[in-house]
Amino acid sequence: MVKNFPLEQSNPERPVISVYPDAKAASVDVAQRIASLIRAKQRDNKQIVLGLATGSTPIYVYEELVRLHREEELSFNNVISFNLDEYFPMQPDSSQSYVAFMKKYLFDHIDIKPENVHIPDGTLARAEIEAYCSAYENKIKAVGGIDIQLLGIGRTGHIGFNEPGATRFSKTRLVELNDLTRTDAAPAFGSKEYVPTEAITMGIDTIMAARKILLMAWGRGKAEIVQKTMETEVTATIPATFLKTCEQVEFVLDNEAASLLTGLEA
Ligand code: PGA
């Protein structure tokens, strides 16, 4: 099922693209791969550090991880997690917060230790943000870096909330949200005017330091940005293109998200 995409422009490594019949099949496979690494680390008495994403894309992955916990005794007691981003400002008990999202889809249903969970804090005073973000980076480093980073992709080409213009060496920081991103988030907030204009996000550099990166995209609605990401040279106007310079990245797509790619080789 893994297909290589022969990208000539700027990518000596040729990113691996895995194409699955549908999002569910892809998500089950991603979850199983995460579970295997969690178990392998448990056998060695080691912790594993997961970089986690929110949005509609990872929901089936989390569902499968919860199933593995309930039905196949997968424990998360050695898991440390860092979420990619959070709206700013945002109260953790608000239903739109990524804290609420993570609880609803994953953390409330597994045995991860609460002290091992990290999600950027949307309640900070503005003056505290810079120091908080650099402490977030330091915490990731202090636990040995991220083993597996899950990513979705926005229609702007953002990863995390690194919108067009984000630089390759950006770190965790406060950013402004792109207009299209706010349009896409409007249903969750009732209306676009209620979508925050800012967020705290890991940077491109933070993400690219992970030892394995799985960028997932499902559905026809992502086909254009997936095609642009693959077929445009590496550029800050499509932040996801930076990933093409990383050999540890894998693009995990369903057939619909891959439908505009040309030149996929079986
Ligand atoms: P989605 O968002 O998973 O809700 O499509 C992805 C993203 O914006 O990164």
Image (tube, rainbow, N blue to C red):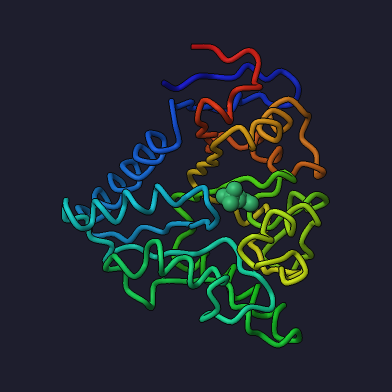
Residue beneath the point at 16% across and 51% down? 72
Asked if residue 208 shows in the view, the reply is: no
Relative side of 201 to 118, left or right: right
Q: Quadrant of the N terminus?
A: top left
Q: Nearer the viewer, residue 179 or 1?
A: 179
Q: Is residue 233 above or below residue 201?
A: above
The residue nearer to you, when weighing 177 against 244, is: 177
Q: Is residue 19 above or below residue 63?
A: above
User: Which image quadrant is residue 237 in?
Assistant: top right
Toward the front, the furthest residue is 190
Residue 140 spot, x, y in % from top left = 51, 65
* Residue 29, picture quadrant: top left
Answer above or below: position of 179 versus 102.
Answer: above
Please, is residue 205 above or below residue 18 in the view?
A: below
Q: How many marks?
A: 0
Q: Position of residue 195 (x, y in %)?
A: 71, 68
Horizontal placement of 92 versus 80: left or right?
A: right
Q: Residue 242 at what x, y percent from top left?
A: 70, 40
Q: Quadrant of residue 251?
A: top right
Q: Is residue 18 left or right of 15 when viewed as pictured?
A: left
Q: Residue at x 48, y 11 (%)?
A: 266
